[in-house]
Amino acid sequence: MFHRHNDDLIWGWVSSPNSRGSINIIYSNLVTIYLCSWTSLCLNFPRPGEERGWRFLWYKFRWQLITIFFPEVVAVTAAEQWLSACQSVKTFATMGHKEWTVRHGFFADMGGIKVAPPDMPPFPVDSHQLAFLVKNGHLPMPRITTADICALNKADGLARILTLIQMAWFCLSCIGRGVGRIGLSPLELTTLALILCTLHNYFFWYFKPLDPQRLEILTMDIPIAQVRRIAGVEGSQLHSPLGFVNPPPDPKSLVTPFWFGVKLVFSPREKLDQGQIQALPNTGIRPPEGVSWGMMLYLLFFSMAYYALHATMGFMVGFPSTFEWYLWTVSNFADIGLITLYCLSIPVGTYYAPSIGKRWFRKQASSVLDLASMLPCWAKLLVHGPFVFAYVAARTIVLTVSFISLRALPAQLYQDVNWSGILPHI
């Protein structure tokens, strides 16, 4: 059993001529973190003007930081996007279009298909909105083959193979250090948890194109105003002219409240302009059939496993001080508590939402998010602000402690794995 604090600390930089040194720990972790956050990140089409050059690099770098700070959130987002793409296959199959695949669903949901009606500029449609247009005869079935989508995929097979090799070696090294009882640094445990999320992303985003540069524009003969009139929709739609097609947020979604709260806290007065409806946000996931209970329980188990990996193995990781160990442990259990609190609020909020919405706001409400959207801005901040700040602060503390702990580590963490003593002799 490793000690959370060891008096035999080595302070400062440790050279590595004959054993593991500071440069070995830093290099191995940073290379793994970079490869995991870059090669596994399949983003939606950016807004016009951000497709190339430094703007695109900045767009992806921002999401790299999000992936490093909140890898479990990105992993759950990938799973719900996969669920939406799979449900689109079922929807198109019932319409007789067997050629529609999960790749098509991902391509549409990431903003790869735009429609150009005669009464407004082109705008992106997701797979559910596209199915609505095709089903009602407003648009012919687009002729986009799987080969066309694969040709747009910028996924570098060599880069992902190198990443998998690096992840395998890193995990093997951590296992060897555990078996040899020489311990891990906090940064190595954080990287190990990131690898878990990266493998999750690889699976659920396997069919999602990586960084495609060209989208499909489909010409419509019927005006959108007429489409909305036929559907019986009145008023304007800020997010999308076809936003009425999408279902309300599913209360079983684990990421929708997070993205709702983050946008509310950090962009409370954000206004939608014409450029913002030209791209589908990476955070806007609404599977048309909702999130199944099986998927919700799996994602809940995955999220708990991610935090449990930090919290439980924190007892076997070397920290420079007991105070930093307490910070690490309390922060991880705080995240576990926040997720538990949210899970408890799902059935309670779903049960009381209709009566509260009708009594207080004179509107229909079916979930906690419906009630939250009815609140004034100050009330939204009052309700969501503490939870978002607590979650972000806890994750920031864990990541910060992971790096600053490198200033002083127990001497045993600088020992190399004795593979000859671990592996059986042949």
Image (cartoon, rainbow, N blue to C red):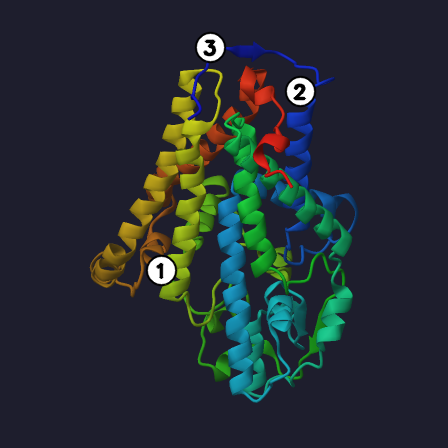
Amino acid type, label 2: Gly
Rendered position, 103 above or below 79: below
Please name the residue that numbered disc 2 is placed on. 21
| Residue 220 position by quadrant | bottom right
- The disc label shown at residue 251, or none: 1
8 sits to left or right of 219: left
From the image, state whether disc 2 or disc 1 is nearer to you: 2
Seen from the viewer's position, the closer of residues 317 and 238 is 317
Q: Quadrant of the C terminus?
A: top right
- The disc label shown at residue 7, or none: 3
- How far apart are the two marked residues, 2 and 1, measured between alpha carbons? 48 Å
- Residues at discs 3 and 1 in contact (Cβ within 8 Å): no
Amino acid type, label 1: Pro
From the image, state whether disc 3 or disc 1 is nearer to you: 3
Dot 2 crowding, Cα within 10 Å, few <14, some 14–19, many 20+: some
- How far apart are the two marked residues, 3 and 1, measured between alpha carbons? 49 Å
Q: Position of residue 35 (x, y in %)?
A: 68, 43
Q: Position of residue 152 (x, y in %)?
A: 76, 65
- How far apart are the two marked residues, 3 and 2, measured between alpha carbons? 19 Å
Q: Residue at x 53, y 44 (%)?
A: 71
- The disc label shown at residue 33, or none: none
- Can residue 410 be seen in the rendering of this structure? no
